[in-house]
Image (cartoon, helix red, strand yellow):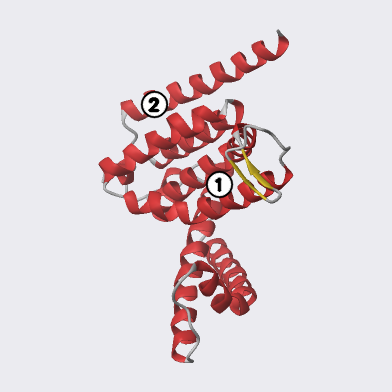
Amino acid sequence: MFIEKIHPHTKVIFSLAMIFLSAINDYTISFLVIIPLLFVLHIFNRSIKTFIVSMYVIVPYLFMLTLIYGLLGEVSSDNWIAIYNFKLNEVVLSSILYRSKTVVVMIFMLSSLFKHTSSDSMLLAYSNHVFAQTVSFLFMNIKNTLSHLKLRASNVLIAQQTRGINTQGFLTTRIRALWPMIMPLTMSAMMDSQERQLTLYVRGFDIESPRENIQVLKKHKLEKLLEISLIGLVIVSLLWEVYQWLN
């Protein structure tokens, strides 16, 4: 799997660049370029499951937007679907895609980044700069919190099953089974986060001094070239948008 072998900083730059490009450009860039590109990368990386898992978040989000904009859309003779107050036409679809373009790309990029970047490699990549250490700590904290929440949520579902509560079937059924445990799971994740923070402080995570690492993480020349190209692409896209806005 080549995504895991890419330098963490390169993956961060790539993720931020894709999110920024989706924000400043039309929705066609997000849905016709960025998302298909990420899909192809996951196919070659044999990690298409990561792409599919992200859809579990994206599909309900798009469904909610479709419902809201469909109910608020104006009546038109060109409606593709018209059921009571719900209307779906080209204008409504364009509004949905425009509003969701950045969020959808962000979900895909962050899920891929968290799934295919280890906490150790992120800490090692940003071990020499104070600001970068904060970024790596936030990354590690979010990654560990999500993994702990997923593990504990699965254990809760198993416990609910042993008590005779139905936890199988549609997403709504699983939500009803897990809903009473949302607050305890959240509080537990916050407590774990504080414990990890204290542990890192005890180990000298915030000490401003040179570090010596047993593992050496090197950046390939192609990765440096990719980072420069991505930054240049973002700058050119931003300047182009400013030029169009001024004219």
Q: Compared with residue 148, is residue 215 higher up or lower down, i.e. above or below?
A: above
Q: Compared with residue 50, is residue 155 higher up or lower down, i.e. above or below?
A: below
Q: Compared with residue 232, is residue 200 higher up or lower down, i.e. above or below?
A: below
> What number is the disc on residue 135?
1
Residue that extends furthest to the front in the rendered view of this protein = 77
Q: In which quarter of the image is the C terminus?
A: top right
- Amino acid of disc 2: Leu
Residue visible at 69% across and 51% down? 84
In x, y percent, where is residue 220? 31, 31
Q: Compared with residue 169, is residue 103 higher up or lower down, i.e. above or below?
A: above
In x, y percent, where is residue 232? 49, 19
Secondary structure of the residue carrying tag 1 is helix
- Comes first in the chain, label 2 or label 1: 1
Residue 38 shown left or right of residue 210 in the figure = left
Does the rendering let one see residue 208? no
Could you give the CA–CA distance between mark 2 and mark 1, rounded to whole angstroms? 21 Å
In x, y percent, where is residue 38? 39, 38
Q: Mark 2 points at which residue?
A: 226
Residue visible at 66% across and 15% down? 242
Decide which of 190, 90 is in the foreground and name it: 90
- Amino acid of disc 1: Val
Pointer 1 local density, CA inside 10 Å: few below 14, some 14–19, many at least 20: some
Give residue 78's quadrant in the image. Answer: top right
Decide which of 28, 89 is in the foreground and name it: 89
Q: Report the mark closest to the observer, 2 or 1.
A: 2
Residue 8 shown left or right of residue 141 in the figure = left
Q: Would you say the residues marked 2 and 1 are in contact, meaning their CB atoms lie under 8 Å apart?
A: no
